[in-house]
Image (cartoon, grey):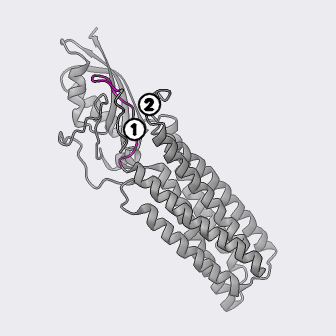
Amino acid sequence: MIEMPAAVAAGSHGHVFLAEDHETSERRTWTVIALCGAMMVAEIVGGLLFGSIALVADGLHMSTHAGALLLAALAYRFARSHANDPRFSFGTGKMGDLAGFTSAIILAMIALLIGYESVLRLLRPVPIHFAQAIPIAFLGLAVNIGSAWILSRGGHHHHHGHDHDDDDDHNHEHGHDHHEHDHGHGPGHRGAAHRDNNMRAAIIHVAADAAVSILVIVGLVLARAFGWLWMDPLAGIIGAAVIATWSYGLIRDTGAILLDMTPDPRLAENLRATVESEGDRVTDLHLWRVGPGHVAAILSVETNEARDAEFYRAMLDRFRVLSHVTVEVAPAK
């Protein structure tokens, strides 16, 4: 976890909105980069030495995923090293979402390239060197499975396995206005508020490569066994469609966060109902995600009672996902 600097005085608050396992995820990403980089160099050098264009092509293909993983690792490092930079009004928690959005665009381009090349080969079949292509596909699959296992080990960045919608326990103050760690407000909330989209993008890259490898192996085996050369490009088309679907989901989710969409409508409803349960009225409410597991809120309240902002902050203590709360109180009209 990132420690708050000594310069943050009592009564003030910091804006470190990073995931609890941020540094662990960063280390895992660098490990997978080393693995993919070694595989990439071995394939390209081996292909050049032994005259195998298939090996060179697979090595160049691996380089695209290594590049995407490098983007994820650099995003983790930037977010960590600038976590206390006052120029970022709400911290650097969204850096992972920006990197995830960029990775999703790269995935979409990879899907288009695979689909284009597959259609060309379907229309104009080319000879396939099965003795080289099949072992390379198995080797690539093994590397991608290993990479996915390293990245997803523990799975903490995706889900928290229990809900605490109204739980007042485990409040963790870290110098924030009402800094807490909510573990869910319904089925959709965990995915929206807690998901580490930077790690999600990295896993999708290796998972997409693994899926394509499986499809390629099936296509090559059938093509070799029955002479169905069209199976290889068909597998490529199916793989491109799968990657495009994953890319769309990642673009949709990260884009929503970058545009400050409400991360969970149910959380908004529960928050409004909690404040209005005392007879007051919420006249304005804004919720947006500032990092994995961190949601900021701005609300305006009209009341007939002598209540200040601290009263409403205390009322909202049960919503532990709220890491930054701004309350405006006005007398009821």
The quadrant of the rendering that contains the N terminus is top left
- Image quadrant assignment for residue 269: top left
* Residue in view at x 17 percent, y 42 percent: 169
* Relative side of 98 to 180, left or right: right
Give the secondary structure at mark 1. loop
Report if residue 282 lies within the magenta region. Answer: no
Q: Nearer the viewer, residue 45 or 234?
A: 45
* Residue at x 26%, y 19% (from the top left corner): 309
Locate the C terminus by quadrant: top left
Residue at (79, 78) in percent of width and height: 125
User: How far is the residue under mark 1 from the one under mark 2?
Assistant: 8 Å
Whole-percent x, y for residue 227 in the image: 72, 89
Check disc 2: other Cα within 10 Å, few if <14, some if 14-19, many if 20+: many
- Residue 90 shows which numbered tag? 2
Give the residue pinned by disc 1. Answer: 17
Numbered label attached to residue 59: none
Please indicate, yes or no, whether residue 73 appears anywhere in the rendered image: yes
Q: Is residue 60 left or right of residue 12?
A: right
Residue at 52% in and 63% down: 32
Q: Residues within 10 Å of mark 1 (few under 14, many from 20)?
A: many
Residue 19 belongs to magenta span: yes
Q: Amino acid at mark 2?
A: Phe
Compared to residue 305, the image places residue 117 above or below, namely below
Q: Who comes first in sequence, dot 1 or dot 2? A: 1
Between residues 113 and 80, which one lies in front from this camera angle?
80
**Left or right, residue 249 beside residue 219:** left
User: Which image quarter: residue 41?
Assistant: bottom right
What secondary structure is found at the residue carrying circle 2? loop
Q: Which residues are magenta?
A: 8-20
Q: Along the line of sight, which residue is nearer the eye, 235 or 56? A: 56
Picture coordinates of residue 119, whole percent (x, y): 75, 68
